[in-house]
Image (tube, rainbow, N blue to C red):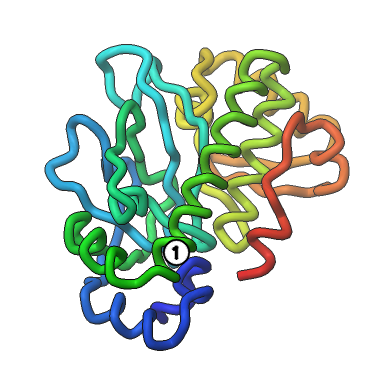
Amino acid sequence: MIFSENGLVAQLAASDQALLRRRCTMVELTVGDLLQGAEADRKVAYFLTGATVALCVRQGESGAGDASLALGLAGFEGAVGVQYGVGIDAGIFSSWVQTAGPAWCIDGLELQQLVARRPPMLLLFSRYVWTVLQDVAALAACAQLHDIKSRLASWILMSELRSRGGELMLTHTHLAQMLGVRRAGVTTAALELKRQGLIDYQRGSLRIVDRGGLEAVSCWLPDRKRVDST
């Protein structure tokens, strides 16, 4: 997978891309992998090129289970753990792989040392952290103000956009974990979206049928301009 296919990397000057590339290693991420959080072994930043990763807040002691709530999703447009580069820890957030795929990883301390010498990297990564925080705020508001169907529509749209489109491997159990609700609630909402002709799903494979209709139902849309610019 080409390093510059990551949206953040693509915005760096060629010289900075080369410096970062020499310090990165390509890895294959697996669904359910914990990338950052209290239980993670290391502080590592991942520049995603194929995987998608959910940013979750734990509400209990069961990790990525029913006591978690997803407040962000990163895909090929961004990264996970890039806050280490600007000297910020993961805090209360945990990052779990939603869709398997490749990524380029670098030790968090090594990234911080590199960023300290490259002001353009510092500026870019700081802006990205701020953008992620806005996503977190938007999804947190949705969780308080909107019903499961609207939130489900938003998560499906975001997942499709940040995984370069196509079919999504998303089970009702996983979606319930991401939304912090009961599986039965997701099943009911998904069935209603299917009956309206907005989505189709079978055995964990989900496909958007009517994007415009799904956007009309959703309570929040990802920043399409930010993703399309990559």
Q: Which residue is drawn at 38% across and 87% down?
A: 15
- Circle 1 residues within 10 Å: few <14, some 14–19, many ≥20: many
Residue 160 percent across, percent down from the top left = 62, 52
Residue 220 percent across, percent down from the top left = 73, 34
Classify residue 79 as left or right of residue 25: right
Amino acid type for the residue under numbered disc 1:
Gly
Quadrant in the picture for residue 38 = top left
In the displayed structure, 200 sits above or below 94; it is below
Q: Residue at x 44, y 40 (%)?
A: 54
Residue highlighted by disc 1: 50
In the picture as drawn, the residue positioned furthest to the left comes out as: 41
Q: Quadrant of the C terminus?
A: bottom right
Q: Quadrant of the N terminus?
A: bottom left
Quadrant in the picture for residue 61 = top left
Element under disc 1? loop
Considering depth in this image, is 165 or 44 the residue closer to the camera? 44
Classify residue 176 as left or right of residue 22: right
Considering depth in this image, is 91 or 149 the residue closer to the camera? 91
Q: Residue at x 29, y 81 (%)?
A: 19
Q: Residue at x 65, y 21 (%)?
A: 141
Residue 135 percent across, percent down from the top left = 59, 38
Residue 42 percent across, percent down from the top left = 14, 46
Classify residue 7 as left or right of residue 80: right
In the displayed structure, 208 sits above or below 22; it is above
Considering depth in this image, is 114 or 175 the residue closer to the camera? 114
Classify residue 99 as left or right of residue 138: left
Callout count: 1
In the displayed structure, 110 sits above or below 136; it is below
